[in-house]
Image (cartoon, grey):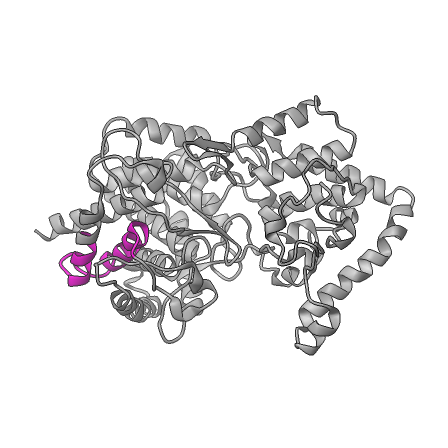
Amino acid sequence: MGVLDWNEMAQVPAELILLPASAPVSIYAFSYWSRVTAVPIMILRHHRPVYRIVPEGFLDELYVDPDDKHLRFTPPLGTLWRDGEKGRFCGSLADRALGILDPILRRVPMTRPYALSCCVRYILDHLDAGGYGAFWNSNFAAVMALHAEGFSAQHPAVQHLLTAIDTCLWEDTLGIRMQVTIGPVWDTALMAMGLLETGLADSRMELTAQWFKSRQILETQGDYRVRNQMLAPGGWPFQYCNSHYPDTDDTLVALMTIIMHTPSDVTSQSCIRAIDWLLGMQCYDGGWACFDLNNDHRYLNLFPFGQGNQFYDPSVPDITGRILECLGMVLSILSSPATKRGSTFVNTFHYQRIQQACRRGILFLDSVQETGTGIWGSRWHINYLDGTSSVLCGLMSVRVFFEDDQQIKETIERMIVCPLAWLKSTQNADGGWGEDVASYSDATKAGRGVSTPTQTAWALMGLLSHLPPTDSAVIRGVQYLVKTQTGSPVSEEVGAGIGAGPGATWTQKEYVSVGFPDILWLDYASSRHGYPMIALGRWLHEMKRKS
């Protein structure tokens, strides 16, 4: 658009797509969200198109000095060296070298044209009903890249991508804005689990379970196969359709919804495929990532192209804890006499395979537990409140299956003491819990912030997993959720997405979810409604059991 100079952009040569997945730097070393963006940018970086369609002064507010619109990814090489940032120094030096080599690479016969054709092929091969990668930015970049490669605006692929972009538009009384993506799988699971936990689900929940089964990815081989070639599909994506990139977090909540509704479904073909997929996505360190496995290439963020993003998708405690909670639920159902009598799926091998995966997951969580406080951070939700709650719930779910494993039993008992005390210590005077986004850059702010219904629900779930429902901190947290629930639907101004129609909900303006820590914060409209329902439902269940 003429706002930035291509000469100031980081180098992303198209030949990168030709490197094997085993290379230290390849498109498969990138996280999914970086990969689907990088491939079209390789094409655009070659063609360097300029579309002067914006008025003068466009985006001036992004610059410290609007008269100096130069893009600076990193400090000068000399500054990086003096500051001891050797990694970023080497990354910037490599970027400079690629800039010098680019004119030569352009003239190598066949190589650059072949690389560009491979980029186009990757985009076209990864098109599905959600477009390309199911993000608006990946869809938009793909449109621009295909146009640069000579595709007309009327080409079916371009038209399909434009339609996918339109689905991300959100219009309300505040105007029109673009959503990063749309997540019906996550939203539906959160609401369904809220209804199931509270006991308020009715016969319509069967429709929800069938909808999940109809959305499960059972045919398309995703990019995860690069790291695990034997892994058959069986996961769910965040979106209506993102068949090449299912993720573990959405898979576990979809699976939990199905088996919470009908426990015997745990031995159905759908659930077996989901369980096998989750087990196959466990990383070498015993933890789970979101979209990839064994993708811990942190050095990629040392390159200028990696600035303002997170190029890796490593094992994280929040997802690992949630998967343990899910697998614990699976083991509980599988160990019941009725399931053992009626299923060919339940045998010693399957049971032990799940149990061994849980054991490795517990040891991973033990290895990444923070010293001193004993808490865990979260990659995908803010922050220590979510990470700590997810782990505590996971440990509670699986601990009964390690009564005869003295090492794991003692490890779990040791792991839960400090985080439970920490959760109690961070409770606010109003009975709720909150945590600011600043905790990602300043650990002293962990668990500190204005109370929110979502984060209060996380803390309650963590405490309830190991403490009685009559614990004073639990009671105060429940009281906070009860007294802050609205008496009627709310307007879009105090919480978009949820609130239309009869009933009551909770208001929340604070961001509690993460795109990239310290870079991009997300708002899932379902969080402030679904999580409090889950927490209150679990409290009611524990109170009934106690009585």
- Identify the residue at the far left of this view: 547
Task: Between residue 504 and residue 138, name the one nearer to us.
Answer: 504
Q: Quadrant of residue 259?
A: top left
Residue 344 shows in this picture: no
- Left of 118 or right of it: where is 201? left
Q: Quadrant of residue 265?
A: top left
> What is the x, y in percent for residue 77?
74, 70
Above or below — where is 286 with respect to 258? below
As for residue 257 lying within the magenta part, the answer is no
Q: Is residue 477 left or right of residue 271?
A: left
Percent of width and height locating residue 477: 21, 56
Q: Main secondary structure of the magenta part?
A: helix
Q: Which residues are magenta?
A: 451-478
Q: Nearer the viewer, residue 218 or 254?
A: 254
> Residue 225 location in percent, x, y?
60, 44
Q: Is residue 468 magenta?
A: yes
Judging depth in this view, the residue of 324 and 250 nearest the camera is: 250
Q: Is residue 14 visible?
A: yes
Q: Position of residue 379 (x, y in %)?
A: 46, 56
Tag count in the figure? 0
Quick one: 235 or 392, which is closer to the camera? 392
Please give left or right for residue 438 compared with residue 142 in the image.
left
